């Protein structure tokens, strides 16, 4: 890692130059922040779990034809990804009211939404990633109308895939955020899912108990964050030694 050239260090990840042109090494840190970095901590093991969970989700998305930046996992904390031009918008999909939507519109947390809602926030930490309308996106040239239509389609496909993946292991996908990048091929570009998909960027509730298994555990001081993320990884069968030993019946 020491020999790699750092391109960018974010709140939870570091990007290094990849071994071939057009590739990047994405390193998952244990640093955890919330409320626009006002609350921060280092949660041991979180980066390892997020690296593994994001790999699993991205590989699954690729397998159903949803393009992502993921190439392969390199080690416990690093994965090789395609270099993209990140569109400066956070794409949020919501299935149940929670977080800022619940607060902003006065809707009780957990209320099912009549249909998935897609929102865009302008990626700008100094401004606190404000919610924006499509009109702002076009006016400030963050993306074209064609890109926005494509982003909504991608986000809804990711929602369908992830809702099913998680429902199968007893987890409700309440909402999540993705980032989308442009991958250039000459004058053309295609849009692909980039960044990460982990419990840092989703709200995940246990279907039976309603227990939170995502970054809200840290935001709201509900317990050990690594334990919550390990629970998600365990249910997705991503932890070694996870095979339940079924006692052999004798007689
Ligand atoms: N989210 C994220 N990064 C952000 C803002 C939101 O990953 O900078 C995720 C968040 O974890 C949740 C969803 O997007 O799963 C919707 O978040 P919301 O707008 O409710 O904001 P929050 O309450 O997380 O500040």
Image (cartoon, grey):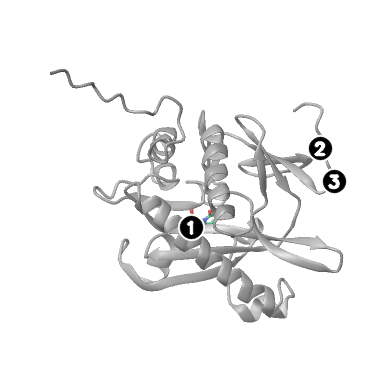
Q: Badge 3, how many Cα within 10 Å: few under 14, some, many 20+?
A: few
- Residue 57 in the image: x percent, y percent? 52, 48
Give yes or no for contact between labels 2 and 3 (Cβ–Cβ under 8 Å): no
Q: CA distance from mark 2 to mark 3?
A: 7 Å
Q: Is disc 2 surrounded by few (<14), some (14 to 19) or many (20+) residues within 10 Å?
A: few
Instruction: Indicate whether 170 appears above or below 223.
Output: below
The reply to whether residue 176 is in sight is yes
134 horizontally vs 141: left or right: left
Q: Secondary structure at mark 1?
A: strand
Q: Secondary structure at mark 3?
A: loop
Residue 176 tag number: 1
The residue at 26%/25% (across/down) is 246
**Residue 13 screen position, x and y as percent:** 64, 41
Q: Quadrant of residue 150?
A: bottom right
Do the numbered discs 2 and 1 sit on residues whose CB atoms are within 8 Å? no
Q: Residue at x 72, y 65 (%)?
A: 190
Label 3 sits on residue: 21
Farthest left residue in view: 251
| Residue 110 percent across, percent down from the top left | 31, 61
Question: Residue 99 sits in which quadrant?
Answer: bottom left
User: Which quadrant of the structure image shows residue 247?
Assistant: top left
Other-residue count near label 1 (Cα within 10 Å), few / some / many at <14 / 14–19 / ≥20: many
Judge from the rendering whether residue 86 lies leftward or rightward of residue 206; answer left or right: right
Q: Which residue is mark 2?
A: 19
| Residue 200 percent across, percent down from the top left | 50, 46
* Quarter that holds the C terminus: top left
**Spatial distance from mark 1 to mark 3, Cα to Cα?**
31 Å
| Label of residue 232 in the image | none
Q: Does the Cβ of the disc 1 residue fall within 8 Å of ligand 1?
A: yes
Q: CA distance from mark 2 to mark 1?
A: 31 Å
Which callout, 2 or 1, points to the residue nearer the camera?
2
């Amino acid at each position: 890692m020491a020999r790699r050239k750092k391109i960018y260090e974010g709140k939870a990840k570091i990007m290094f130059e990849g071994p071939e042109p057009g590739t990047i090494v994405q390193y998952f840190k244990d640093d955890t922040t919330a409320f626009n970095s006002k609350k921060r901590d280092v949660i041991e093991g979180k980066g390892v779990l997020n690296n593994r969970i994001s790999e699993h989700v991205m590989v699954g998305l690729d397998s159903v034809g949803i393009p992502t930046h993921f190439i392969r996992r390199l080690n416990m904390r690093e994965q090789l990804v395609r270099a993209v031009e990140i569109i400066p918008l956070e794409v949020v999909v919501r299935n149940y009211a929670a977080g800022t939507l619940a607060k902003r519109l006065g809707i009780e947390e957990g209320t099912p939404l009549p249909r998935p809602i897609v929102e865009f926030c302008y990626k700008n930490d100094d401004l606190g990633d404000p919610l924006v309308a499509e009109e702002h996106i076009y006016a400030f040239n963050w993306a074209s109308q064609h890109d926005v239509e494509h982003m909504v389609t991608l986000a809804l496909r990711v929602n369908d895939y992830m809702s099913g993946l998680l429902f199968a292991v007893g987890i409700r996908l309440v909402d999540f955020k993705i980032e989308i990048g442009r991958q250039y091929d000459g004058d053309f570009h295609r849009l692909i899912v980039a960044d990460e998909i982990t419990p840092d960027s989703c709200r995940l509730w246990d279907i039976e108990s309603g227990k939170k298994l995502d970054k809200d555990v840290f935001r709201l001081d509900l317990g050990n964050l690594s334990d919550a993320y390990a629970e998600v990884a365990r249910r997705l069968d991503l932890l070694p030694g996870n095979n339940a030993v079924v006692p052999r019946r004798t007689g």
